[in-house]
């Protein structure tokens, strides 16, 4: 099944890539905002919240980078 999803990604149009990029950017922003809000309620420091969030943000940033590169190569 992952093979078919790879084919789908390779055949994505510029518009589809732009939509995926926009969705990942929105998701990243929502993730940061909701996590920071939860951290405030739990009275955690911003640095400790960001330290926990950093691995997930790195994954999202890597995906965004790949999508931008794929869009640029079309």
Image (cartoon, rainbow, N blue to C red):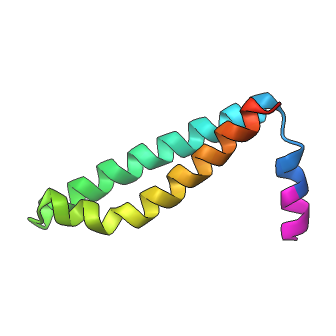
Quarter of the image for residue 69 reads: top right
Q: Is residue 73 magenta?
A: no
Position in image of residue 54 (x %, y %): 36, 61
| Number of numbered discs visible in the structure rendering | 0
Specify start and end residues of the magenta stretch as a single range.
Answer: 1-6
Q: Is residue 31 above or below residue 56?
A: above
Residue found at x 58% / y 41%: 23
Quarter of the image for residue 51 reads: bottom left
What secondary structure predominates along the stretch shown in magenta? helix
Looking at this view, is 20 or 54 the one in front? 54
Q: Is residue 51 left or right of residue 28?
A: left
Q: Is residue 74 left or right of residue 24?
A: right
Position in image of residue 53 (x %, y %): 34, 63
Q: Is residue 27 left or right of residue 50?
A: right
Position in image of residue 22 (x %, y %): 58, 35
Position in image of residue 30 (x %, y %): 40, 47
Q: Is residue 4 magenta?
A: yes
Residue found at x 51% / y 50%: 61
Looking at this view, is 10 or 30 the one in front? 10
Q: Quadrant of the C terminus?
A: top right
Residue found at x 89% / y 66%: 3
Q: Quadrant of the N terminus?
A: bottom right
Q: Is residue 36 above or below residue 49?
A: above
Q: Is residue 53 left or right of residue 39?
A: right
Residue found at x 56% / y 45%: 24
């Amino acid at each position: 099944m992952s093979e078919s999803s790879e084919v789908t990604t390779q055949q994505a149009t510029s518009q589809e890539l732009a939509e995926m990029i926009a969705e990942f950017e929105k998701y990243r922003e929502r993730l940061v905002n909701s996590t920071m809000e939860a951290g405030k309620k739990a009275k955690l420091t911003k640095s400790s919240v960001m330290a926990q969030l950093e691995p997930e943000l790195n994954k999202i940033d890597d995906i965004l980078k790949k999508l931008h590169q794929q869009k640029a190569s079309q």
